[in-house]
Image (cartoon, grey):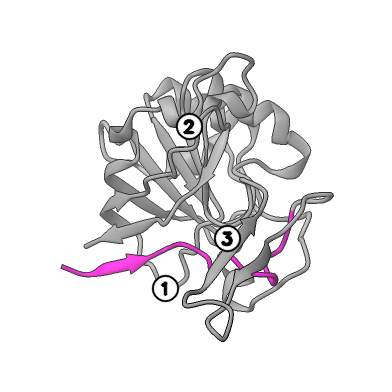
Amino acid sequence: MKIIDISVTIDQHLPLWPNSSGLCLTPIARIGKKSLFNETHIEMNAHIGTHIDAPLHFIDKGVSIDKSLLDTFIGPAVVVDLLKSKEITVKDLETLHLPKGVKRILFKTSNSKLWKNKVKKFKKDYVGLTAGAATWLVKRGVKLVGIDYLSIAKMSEAVEVHRILLRKNVYILESINLTGVKPGTYELISLPLKISGAEAAPVRAILLK
């Protein structure tokens, strides 16, 4: 069995959504004369690095991350190649000829090159879903979608796309790195931290082949 880590490293070099805060690590104790152990305080936005968006992110009284069903985050997932697309449209989805009954889809786009090249600056022209594509996915019973940048939606339609997906309890896996991952079916494991009342949580996402 091959384990493929598709998570990005959470550090001070991650690109951030405009006006978002990044990682802050504060040493509480360090091994030395005054301490026998190391201890660190972690402060970060729930939406930096590889993370899961739960319905509560955009839906008032939506399901929070700790109340979400775990089987959503574990199971067969299809990685699809849309490297030539500047946005993900209904036409793009229809040309993929997805397997019948697919529940988890991970979109590999030109965004992955940004991770490969370690681009820290936020790119507004990243590839994401259009509202029409989000509706198409909902109608076909998909329950998790993932993408290789900070948002599942193209920037101009970010609010609408999130609402379309999350209103129907389609969970969103964002900021995955699919560099070097070939299209095909894998076993996805992407369990978010169980944070009470949170609308999102970090995740260590892996693919098994």
Horizontal and vertical percent for residue 205?
A: 40, 55
| Magenta stretch holds residue 15 | yes
**Mark 2, residue position:** 65
In the drawing, does residue 147 fall left or right of residue 120? left
- Dot in front, 3 or 1: 1
Q: Residue at x 61, y 58 (%)?
A: 42
Q: Locate residue 23: give its quadrant.
A: bottom right
Residue 84: mark: 3
Q: Residue furthest left?
A: 1
| Magenta stretch holds residue 14 | yes
Q: Given contact means CB atoms under 8 Å apart, are the residues at marks 1 and 2 in contact?
A: no
Task: Name the element at disc 2.
Answer: helix
Question: What kind of secondary structure does the magenta stretch mostly adopt?
Answer: loop
Task: Name the element at disc 3.
Answer: loop
Q: In this orientation, which residue lies closer to the viewer: 171 or 135?
A: 171
Is the C terminus in the top left, top right, bottom left or bottom right quadrant?
Answer: bottom left
Type of amino acid under label 2: Ile
Q: Which residues are magenta?
A: 1-16
**Mark 1, residue position:** 180
Instruction: Give whichever of discs 1 and 2 has the lower sequence position.
Output: 2
Gap in angstroms between the C-alphas marked 1 and 2: 29 Å
Instruction: Give whichever of discs 3 and 2 has the lower sequence position.
Output: 2
Query: In the rendered view, would you say 135 is above or below 44?
Result: above
